[in-house]
Image: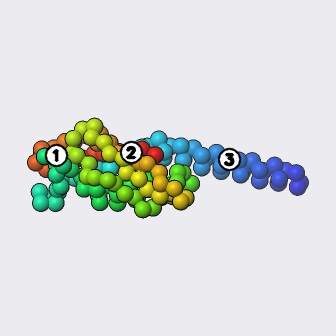
Amino acid sequence: MQRGFLLGAVGGAVAVAAVAGLVTWLCAAKDLQHTTVDPIAQDLYVRVDGHLAVADTVLEARIQGWYHPLPWIGREIHDVSCPSHLKAVASAAETCTARSGGERIPIPVRVIDVGGDPVKPRVTWKFYR
């Protein structure tokens, strides 16, 4: 009787771990680390080399909020810092940094799409872990 209970408990724990692993893999595969900045009032845009740009403060806030979406994946980060604004131009890139465990880690950022009105573009960008 005890052996059957023990076997069932171990089997149940393995099944729960397998389901949790599958859910983690599916969530990570959904590419949760991209974000879109919708058109905003013209006076809130910043400019870099004559191009509209996503403000560094927006990059920092979005990375801080999205870098660690699942507590059991990735690293806990803080003190996100981006050296400049991100041009609203496809393939524009920047490398932000953050603190994790006492060290600075690089977080590459790249614009993957710019659409809509050129005066008020909709910018989709992605950061990499």
Residue under label 3, please give it. 15
Q: Secondary structure at mark 1?
A: loop
Q: Earlier in the sequence, mark 3 or mark 1?
A: 3
Query: Between tags 3 and 1, which lies in front?
Result: 1
Could you tell me residue 26's position as x and y percent? 50, 43
The amino acid type found where label 2 is placed reads Pro
Check the picture and name the quadrant holding the N terminus: bottom right
Q: Earlier in the sequence, mark 3 or mark 2?
A: 3
Residue under label 1, please give it. 49
Mark 3 and 1 residues: CB-CB less than 8 Å, in contact?
A: no
Residue under label 2, please give it. 108
Query: Between tags 3 and 2, which lies in front?
Result: 2
The amino acid type found where label 1 is placed reads Asp
Could you tell me residue 19's position as x and y percent? 61, 47
Report whether residue 111 is seen. Answer: yes
Position of residue 85 in the picture relative to residue 15 (left or right): left
Looking at this rendering, what residue extends furthest in the top direction? 91
Mark linked to residue 6: none
User: Disc 2 versus disc 1: distance between alpha carbons?
Assistant: 20 Å
User: Disc 3 versus disc 1: distance between alpha carbons?
Assistant: 55 Å
Q: Residue at x 65, y 49 (%)?
A: 17
Q: Secondary structure at mark 2?
A: strand
Q: Residues within 10 Å of mark 3 (few under 14, many from 20)?
A: few
Q: Residues within 10 Å of mark 1 (few under 14, many from 20)?
A: few
